[in-house]
């Protein structure tokens, strides 16, 4: 990856004068990635022979406000349709259960997607990850029904399955002779929704299994990307354990590591040319008591070309009062919005940050 955007870097220095250089670089990378190559976006959407591109977005919750929009015939992804279409493939984390089956689990938040959700998912997404703490909101039976609904709609899924073997199986995407394997894992209350040898569930974030899966997938794919649901909610930085595991994923052969779940965007690292995006933030998500005044998130585009490092581009979105995303430019973000452009110096790029004392932690959304 190479960006030459001195003006973006200088603007961030003015906005965030107290940020350490490494943290500033991460923010600058996001801005530069969002604006790099605007003149040749059309060319990037279709890489030359021997390459492919894929877009990742964070949490997609189609209950509540977004669910009401769908029930009234509105497309919750319409305002970001160009970002989603600007790649060969688009993938998101579906953080709700489709269908009517199963039994609601005893937990603070359970999400059931609106009945017409598959129509809009199919329109905008090539596949969805089910590796999250809400895929089991209605028990194994609810997840099995969701898998059937997605299959019937022609929407591939990964990160969950009828057995642990199914849940750990990679999604294989291919374009222009380039083969990409995408894996999904849930690290938040993982044991409560984990698949077993004979019960449906998500793939748990177990280090030994993750590294084994990456190595195995790398043996028959040109690149491997783990899409991980992990980390504490509403904190701007990953935990040291996440940083350690992400680097082990790189050592095992991951071409990029993409994270979600904290509901806010987090640190970006580049290790030996491999980008690690610890959290994409929300993409479609309603508001609840104690939430920040405005959710923000990232749309990440990875472009793979044979024999070259992966290219990373990032675009920002903000969610309206109904939890529906709209594309924005970085300069429009609120300076103190949770998860964007902090003005106070964090305790260190690789250390866990304390949650904002004015915003109570969420009980497991």
Image (spheres, rainbow, N blue to C red):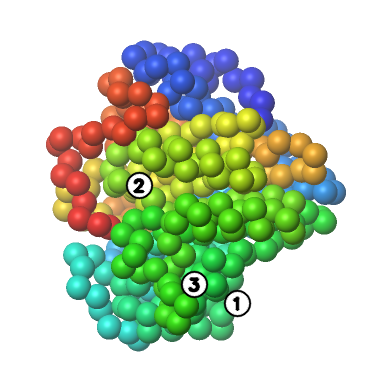
Could you give the CA–CA distance between mark 3 and mark 2, rounded to whole angstroms?
A: 22 Å
Q: Secondary structure at mark 1?
A: loop
**Residue tagged by mark 3?**
164
Real-space Cα distance between discs 1 and 2? 31 Å
Q: Quadrant of residue 174?
A: bottom right
Residue marked by disc 2: 231
Mark 1 or mark 2, earlier in chain: 1
Q: Position of residue 227 (x, y in %)?
A: 51, 53
- Nearer the viewer's eye, disc 3 or disc 1? 3
Nearer to us of marks 1 and 2 is 2
Left or right of 168, for residue 4: right
Q: Residue at x 37, y 18 (%)?
A: 19
Tag on residue 154?
Answer: 1
- Where disc 2 sits, the SS reads loop
Residue in view at x 51 percent, y 69 percent: 167
Q: Position of residue 7 (x, y in %)?
A: 54, 16
User: Is 316 rendered above or below residue 135?
Assistant: above
What x and y, as percent, mark residue 278?
45, 41
Q: Residue at x 64, y 32 (%)?
A: 273
């Amino acid at each position: 990856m190479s960006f030459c955007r001195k003006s973006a870097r200088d603007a961030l220095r003015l906005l965030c004068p107290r940020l350490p250089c490494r943290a500033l670089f991460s923010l600058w990378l996001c801005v530069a990635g969002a604006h790099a190559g605007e003149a040749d976006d059309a060319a990037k959407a279709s890489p030359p022979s021997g390459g492919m591109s894929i877009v990742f977005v964070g949490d997609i919750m189609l209950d509540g406000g977004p669910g009401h929009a769908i029930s009234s015939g509105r497309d919750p992804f319409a305002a970001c349709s160009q970002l989603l279409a600007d790649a060969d493939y688009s993938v998101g984390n579906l953080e709700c259960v489709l269908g009517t089956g199963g039994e609601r689990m005893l937990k603070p938040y359970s999400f059931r997607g609106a009945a017409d959700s598959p129509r809009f998912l199919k329109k905008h997404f090539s596949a969805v990850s089910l590796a999250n703490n809400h895929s089991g909101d209605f028990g194994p039976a609810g997840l099995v029904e969701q898998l059937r609904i997605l299959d019937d709609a022609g929407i591939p899924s990964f990160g969950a399955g009828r057995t642990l073997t199914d849940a750990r199986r990679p999604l294989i995407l291919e374009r222009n002779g380039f083969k990409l394997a995408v894996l999904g894992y849930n690290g938040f209350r993982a044991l409560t929704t984990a698949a077993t040898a004979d019960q449906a569930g998500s793939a748990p974030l177990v280090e030994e299994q993750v590294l084994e899966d990456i190595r195995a997938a790398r043996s028959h794919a040109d690149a491997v990307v783990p899409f991980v649901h992990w980390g504490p909610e509403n904190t701007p930085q990953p935990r040291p354990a996440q940083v350690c595991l992400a680097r082990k994923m790189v050592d095992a052969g991951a071409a990029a590591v993409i994270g979600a779940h904290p509901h806010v965007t987090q640190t970006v690292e580049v290790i030996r040319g491999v980008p690690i995006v610890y959290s994409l933030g929300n993409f479609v998500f309603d508001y609840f008591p104690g939430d920040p005044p405005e959710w923000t998130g990232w749309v990440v585009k990875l472009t793979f070309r044979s024999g070259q490092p992966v290219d990373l581009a990032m675009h920002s979105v903000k969610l309206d009062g109904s939890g529906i995303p709209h594309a924005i430019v970085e300069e429009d973000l609120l300076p103190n919005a949770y998860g964007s452009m902090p003005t106070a110096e964090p305790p260190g790029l690789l250390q866990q940050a304390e949650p904002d004392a004015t915003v109570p932690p969420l009980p497991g959304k």
